[in-house]
Image (spheres, rainbow, N blue to C red):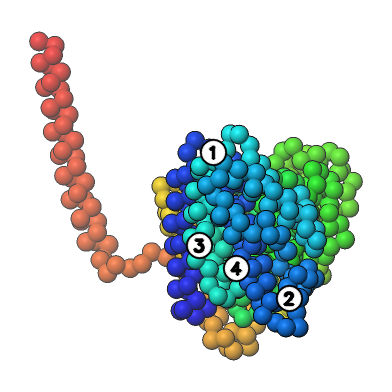
Amino acid sequence: MTIESERQISQDLDFAADLFKAADKMRGSLEPSEYKHVALGLIFLKYISEAFQAMYDQLKADDLANEEDHEEYLAENVFWVPEKARWAHIQKNARSDEIGKIIDDAMEAIETAPANETLKGVLPKNYARPTLDKTMLGELVDLFSNIKLHNSKDRARDLLGRVYEYFISGFAGAEGKRGGEFFTPRSVVRTLVEMLEPYEGRVYDPCCGSGGMFVQSEKFIEEHGGRPDNIAVYGQEINHTTWRLAKMNMAVHGIDADIQWNSAGSFHDDAHASLKADFIMANPPFNISDWGGERLAEDTRWQYGTPPKGNANFGWLQHIIHHLAPRGHAGVVLANGSMSSQTNDEGEIRKQLIEQDRVDCMVALPGQLFYSTQIPVCLWILSRNKSANGHRDRRGEVLFLDARKLGYMADRVRREFAEADIEKIAGTYRRWRAKPETLAAKGWEAYADEAGFCMSADLDLIRKYDHVLTPGRYVGAADIEDDGVSFEEKFEALNLTLGKQFEKSRALQENIEAQLQRIEQ
């Protein structure tokens, strides 16, 4: 990424942050969980209207094109926007008492327009409800009207995409625990994407939330000079409201994705049953107990053991491995208990995963990364073939990374990774996997164990630890940096300090005893 690109991204994020603050002030007493659909729906409407208008103007200037031909827009992955749904019409009526109905009609017109089949049943259409303040709604339209778009369609998409993504993040933070149901923090997603490097192939998420894994995958490809159309995106989401957010998110980012919804979910009604993906990235619900495992006791996905009825963690891992292509890689976010639990056959399933060489890397993450929970979590990096895709043959080995000390506090309750933290994790993993000739070609240092952070362990060592995968057991403690002060000097200084503290303690005790004697008299 160039310095200019980094500067542009920074400016866009600053703009998005300011916009979110301004929009949040208008929320009043409306709950974040309700308000997010109001705001995100309008951002989506603004995006597709601007994208359509740019395409419309381009076609109109071309004597050989027909700006009224819906197929022209479909060919360019641009939605057809009827005249009454275009942003100019919405903005013109922002102060009307009927603005709610006007927006609802616009959403309905977009969904029913030719070539917009993928939006059927996706867009919010309850802006006219009596409980939604129309003055606030008009002010929100005016606010979003001030998003200054550039001549370039790609720049317009980038800016509105970042605004949409920032708003999803902002609402997740405002909703707290409930926000974690639809949003995986950018730090975690970026780390997974940088580790897996999904340049091309099929990308799948069986519990995709609002689609953040897919957005970051596309950004990764663009930042590394690839083509986003080299990946095919597949997802499934059990929550219908969250599925709608994901569909709009994909549209705003221009990602052609096959994201399915059903109320049964990936375990019980697998919408992509025959899919074998090259990359799978997932953040399943933590330690979910009511997943209906008793109805799946004989399922063919359980190649490494039947998951316990009271915890879906090892069900998710096996579902994901089942969907991996022969050379596929996966990254899964799970609660820390999955690394060491021995109850209900979880230890035996983990043992089989290790012995059959499906575990490539384990990453212990710090606490407070998530909106929904303060507990620390881990990343499971899984592989169907550890010697595939031009990488070093690491069969019989697992890389352990302890990243619990990385990151910084973005506010009082939430931690984030800096780019340097993500690179430390992903860069170490890439160097561990790289062949010597790759290291030389890219100018990378060869992988080496680092006390307190990383270690490459063979199966014999993992067996000694009873197949427990907690990185802290393997990486040990970090080397203490020599400060040049001898032990004798340190001991003398500590002894002197301790003596002074004893003196203060005796003086305090004498003072307390004297006060007590006065009280007794």
In the picture provided, is 338 more to the left or to the right than 440?
Answer: right
Which badge, 1 or 3, comes first in the chain's sequence? Answer: 1
- Please, what is the three-letter code of the amino acid marked with disc 2? Asn
Q: Where in the figure is residue 388, as x and y percent of width and height? A: 75, 76
Nearer the observer, disc 1 or disc 2? 1
- The spot of residue 389 in percent (x, y) is 73, 78
Crowding at mark 1 (Cα within 10 Å: few <14, some 14-19, many 20+) = some
**Quadrant holding the C terminus:** top left
Q: Position of residue 57 (x, y in %)?
A: 65, 74
Say above or below: 159 vs 168. below
Residue on which disc 2 sits: 230
Return the residue at label 3: 147
Which amino acid type is shown beneath numbered disc 4?
Answer: Arg
> Nearer the observer, disc 4 or disc 1?
1
Q: In this orientation, which residue lies closer to the viewer: 198 or 517?
A: 198
Residue 324 x %, y %: 79, 64
Residue type at mark 3 is Ile
In three-dimensional space, the C-alpha distance between marks 2 and 4, rounded to whole angstroms, equals 19 Å
Which residue is disc 1 drawn over?
133
Q: Residue 157 shows which numbered tag? A: 4
Along the line of sight, which residue is nearer the eye, 332 or 451? 332
| The one of 493 and 269 positioned closer to us in this rendering | 269
Q: CA distance from mark 2 to mark 3?
A: 30 Å
